[in-house]
Image (cartoon, coloured by chain):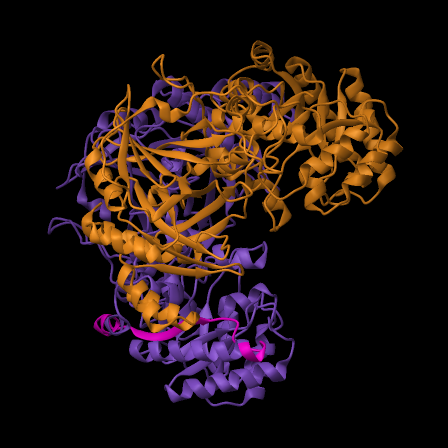
Chain colours: A orange, B purple
């Protein structure tokens, strides 16, 4: 199916918007009137620009308050329409959107509305233009898609059809099944947007909080299936009003938008993408730093041993149990910017995983390796983190690994590393429990969709966490057995540094022993205020000894219906810190209830140390 | 009355919050549990800190899901309560907030709720603590203040009373009149918050969008009047959850908060402030610049004449009609930062105006003047703009100038300026029509409240304006005859520079002549895209000649039920540009409909010139 995007969904000048839409692979655009008015280009120049960019002008929009108004007003509307139809001819647009009237002058008179729309369509026909009539969710008298369709049907004009908009339909709670009663050739256009639930005032909701399909709470795919059953052959077009997208760079937003449509098309069966290959574990986390000393000290105190060094690059492998951390001093990293740059994901079929990522517009990374290195497929996540798909023998994990041909065996990535002499690692840490990655402010919803769509992970509900200087949002994506868990976080505001810290959480069966070992090895744990433990005593039935131990070490505590979670934090190096976590009895969360205390403690440490 | 503020209303660490509340003049605080948990201070230390700062700990909050729960759960609750009461004793807090249960376990059983609350109050009494029970708007069974009061009454325990919260009452649309049926001594606490209308989901509304009284749409003063009639003698306390305040610096937010309570107390008759002295005109606008050349060129082309120079400071007075612009090269201003630094407001009683401003916590500015200069009262607005109250003979303007003793005559500020030889000014510009001032992102609502409360101006509805790179918000404050109009604007995001431009709009009776004169004198007007005029032709019945003229000069057009507005813009110098405006037939707006076109044109110019 053809895909299209409304210029209002992207930020910048009209030229920037068209370029971004074209680069992201859209086939067409809806040109929003204000974007045209503000552009220094003539309609003919816009048309030529679109043609150069391979974009069709699928829709011009909108016309408002056209129908069921007093005669004098309608005459003025026809006059205005003639102007706009002339403009559309210059622009090369053949479909105009007409929204149901919101004017207090509009009559509750379907026959009059049909008559007016038929007359408008008659005029449009002279210009070779079609009129697509859409019910606004806050239309004065016409606010449901079936009502709009009854009027279009009554008007009975060949140049008049209806425009369906998933926001207006689903925000009203209308049943989209009735769409199937509309003949496909009378559906002139289909606009798609998702939105978070629950609702606020519908007008505000629509104008500020729409999002791309799959980023909100609507069943947009269900609606599209109904539309497709009518025989509709027009484009899928995204019309998203969103305060965040208005500020974000148009290029990444357009890619995000196209990806959401690809995932949607896959869901409704009109796109054939390589099936997802769900990762089965975290092979490694890679830190980049300008100075290995603080990171090495931290890893050493945590019980990791430096077991190997890359044959051709300045990269060390640190290991404990199945937890592997690479420390890379190769890239030019500014002082203090030590950060998590790459994640190795175990994949039963790495090439297929990379093909899916590429089909979903993830930048495929050049393999910066020596000829003898193991070939690793890698793509960039929206936050710039490099994701490596590391081969591993296929394991039977029902429901997780969709069928697909087994790939020829490849050398293990660890073969690129040369063992070095080392002392024994500790045994407290078993593996990486989860990674917490801070996302760019403007692309938080994109990140969740990326990890869901590209990697086939499940996205959990997003939670708000109070930081002393603003609210953070956090959302976890996981595979079904919890062997891959990534917590995506975003700060309170663009440019806000509060949320920039990333962390690596290490799973242990005995967090108390692990914490003591860390301290004995000279590590410093994040201090937790005494008041926290007084509250813990009030909330939970813990023994005095337990409480004393937690208080002494700075261990935080949470409980869910499944089990118990105990965790503690190291100090931060650059942007990175570590967490030791013990999950008992199937606890599923991430200790979000304790995050405000952790964040305040980190602020307090920074205030003292400046680091 | 005593005033108090919840620590959750301010950002930062608990210490920062307490300091800010104290500096702003609050008498007490509500300590929010999470702030205490995250603090490194013991309860005793917090108590001592509060005492040092002159703050009483008026409330500890909250306890949740206490009442009408199963017996086993309630037993656990009492256990938890005992812990908290011990903590409160250490903290020196004598009132605890209990919110109505939201737990799915809670029974719809008022008798059980009353029994549980009475038992809790009995325990509290042993610690010298009172329990204030509050209906949450989203409480499971108890969600209105009258329902909560019926339960408190039925419980009949002396240590049990009710807490009223304006948000929970007004967001539900409850009639606050019924408050008067509650005995004042049983109202243990009063929490105040305003909120914008219309509503979204009430929980989201409450957690993210509360604001200080007078900054939203609630009749908070009306509610407080009902509470006062009961004989309530407790504090007025602000409990405001707001995403913006969470990020803003605590100090200014606390001042903003106190000011809102002062205005509220004045409205309900419990504070005696100097009456507002509404300004009767704009005496001057003052630009600061490092380099007079570009500003002088612009003023000259606009038809201003440099008529005088300050006797002791590097300040020039430019004049045309009643429009006066001061150009000040005194302060150290970075290159390119030419900006509007001060506004002179004509005031019938300048000293009284300054006294009111001071009473409402506006910083009074030191008079940086030579001994022989005319004494001018001045205060700083929240955005740092200096507001000078310039004496002028009282004019009869009914409704605008509240009674008050006439002040002894003072020398005119212009007496400080020495006339210089100058050519004739043009006559096109009559006076300053309005000033547009960009506000700091975190303090937009504060700015409107300031101009309303301190200066007695009327605030109009705020409007959203689409900029290519984000939404701007704009809100005008005016006096009743329109001789003082200030448009307050805010950018799309903190740190966003889009909205940083300020401008001075000059009133003319003939914008076409003024624009032509400006161009003939070498001035450059902001170019407006041709598409704008095609749309104008479609929307309005304008003659070909009119359209040709507007197009040629870059004049924008708007119409409201009262009249017609035509306006055009100069290029920007530093942060400042000028607008020429012609209002005909009583047009009341500011051409907001044209703002997106203007903003896009300004972006386009910047993209080309970098300026």
Q: Is residue B496 left or right of residue A105?
A: left
Q: Is residue B523 left or right of residue B582?
A: left
Give the image location of residue B606, x and y in percent: 38, 23
Give the image location of residue B512, x and y in percent: 48, 25
Q: Nearer the viewer, residue A120 or A583?
A: A583
The N terminus of chain B - image quarter: bottom left
Rendered image quadrant of residue A296 = top left
Could you tell me which residue is drawn at 23 percent across and 35 percent down? A422
Q: Is any atom of residue B11 visible in this view?
A: no
The C terminus of chain B - image quarter: top left
Q: Is residue B565 above or below residue B84?
A: above
Q: Is residue A223 left or right of residue B358?
A: right
In this picture, which residue range is highlighted in magenta?
B48-72
Rendered image quadrant of residue A163 = top right
Give the image location of residue B263, x and y in percent: 40, 65
Give the image location of residue A58, x and y in percent: 67, 20
Query: Residue placed farthest to the left in the image?
Result: B371
Was residue B217 drawn as part of the magenta stretch in this picture?
no
Rendered image quadrant of residue A539 = bottom left
Q: Nearer the viewer, residue A529 or A68?
A: A529
Q: Is residue B465 left or right of residue A183?
A: left
Q: Is residue A294 above or below residue B101?
A: above
Was residue B67 drawn as part of the magenta stretch in this picture?
yes
Q: Nearer the viewer, residue B577 or A356?
A: A356
Q: Is any atom of residue B420 visible in this view?
A: yes
Q: How many marks?
A: 0
């Amino acid at each position: 199916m053809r895909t299209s995007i409304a210029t209002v969904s992207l930020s910048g000048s009209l030229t920037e918007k068209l370029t971004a839409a074209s680069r992201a692979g859209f086939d067409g655009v809806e040109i929003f009137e204000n974007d045209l008015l503000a552009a220094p280009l003539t309609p003919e120049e816009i048309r030529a620009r679109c043609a150069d960019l391979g974009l069709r002008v699928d829709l011009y929009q909108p016309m408002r308050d056209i129908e069921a108004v007093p005669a004098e007003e309608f005459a003025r509307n026809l006059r205005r329409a003639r102007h706009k139809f002339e403009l559309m001819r210059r622009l090369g647009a053949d479909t105009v959107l007409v929204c149901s009237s919101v004017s207090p002058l509009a009559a509750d008179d379907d026959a009059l509305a049909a008559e007016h729309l038929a007359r408008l369509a008659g005029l449009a026909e002279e210009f070779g233009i079609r009129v697509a009539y859409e019910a606004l969710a806050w239309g004065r008298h016409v606010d449901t898609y079936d009502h709009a369709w009854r009027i279009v049907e009554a008007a009975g004009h060949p140049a008049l059809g209806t425009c369906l908009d998933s926001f207006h339909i689903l925000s009203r709670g209308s049943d989209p099944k009735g769409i199937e009663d509309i003949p496909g050739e009378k559906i002139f256009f289909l606009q798609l947007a998702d939105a978070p639930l629950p609702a606020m005032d519908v007008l505000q909701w629509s104008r500020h909080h729409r999002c791309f399909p799959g980023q909100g709470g609507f069943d947009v795919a269900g609606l599209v299936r109904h539309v497709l059953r009518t025989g509709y052959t027009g484009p899928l077009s995204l019309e998203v009003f969103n305060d965040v997208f208005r500020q974000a760079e148009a290029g990444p937003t357009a890619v995000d938008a196209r990806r959401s449509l690809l995932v949607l098309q896959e869901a409704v069966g009109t796109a054939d993408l390589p099936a997802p290959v769900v990762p089965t574990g975290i092979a490694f986390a890679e830190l980049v730093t300008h100075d290995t000393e603080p990171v090495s000290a931290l890893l050493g105190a945590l019980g990791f041993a430096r077991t190997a060094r890359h044959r051709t690059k300045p990269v060390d492998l640190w290991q404990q149990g199945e937890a592997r951390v690479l420390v890379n001093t190769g890239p030019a990293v500014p002082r203090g910017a030590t950060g998590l740059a790459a994640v190795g994901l175990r994949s039963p079929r790495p090439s297929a995983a990379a093909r899916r990522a590429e089909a979903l517009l993830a930048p495929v990374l050049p393999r910066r390796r020596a000829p003898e290195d193991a070939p690793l497929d890698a793509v960039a996540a929206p936050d710039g983190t490099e994701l490596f798909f590391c081969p591993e023998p296929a394991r039977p994990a029902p429901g997780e690994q969709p069928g697909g041909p087994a790939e020829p065996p490849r050398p293990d990535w660890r073969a690129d590393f040369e063992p070095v002499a080392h002392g024994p690692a500790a045994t407290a840490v078993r593996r990486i429990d989860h990674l917490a990655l801070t996302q760019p402010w403007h692309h938080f919803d994109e990140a969740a969709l990326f990890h869901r769509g590209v990697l086939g992970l499940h996205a959990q509900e997003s939670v708000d966490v109070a930081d002393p200087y603003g609210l953070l949002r956090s959302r976890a994506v996981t595979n079904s057995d919890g062997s891959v868990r990534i917590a995506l976080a975003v700060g309170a505001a663009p440019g806000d540094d509060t949320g920039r810290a990333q962390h690596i959480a290490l799973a242990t069966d005995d967090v108390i022993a692990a914490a003591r070992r860390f301290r004995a090895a000279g590590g410093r744990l994040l201090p937790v205020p005494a008041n926290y433990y007084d509250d813990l005593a009030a909330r939970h039935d813990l023994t005095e000894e337990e409480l004393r131990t937690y208080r002494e070490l700075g261990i935080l505590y949470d409980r869910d219906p499944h089990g118990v979670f105990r965790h503690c934090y190291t100090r931060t190096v650059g942007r990175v810190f570590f967490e030791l976590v013990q999950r008992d009895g199937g606890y599923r969360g991430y200790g979000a209830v304790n995050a405000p205390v952790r964040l305040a403690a980190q602020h307090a440490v920074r205030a003292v140390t400046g680091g």
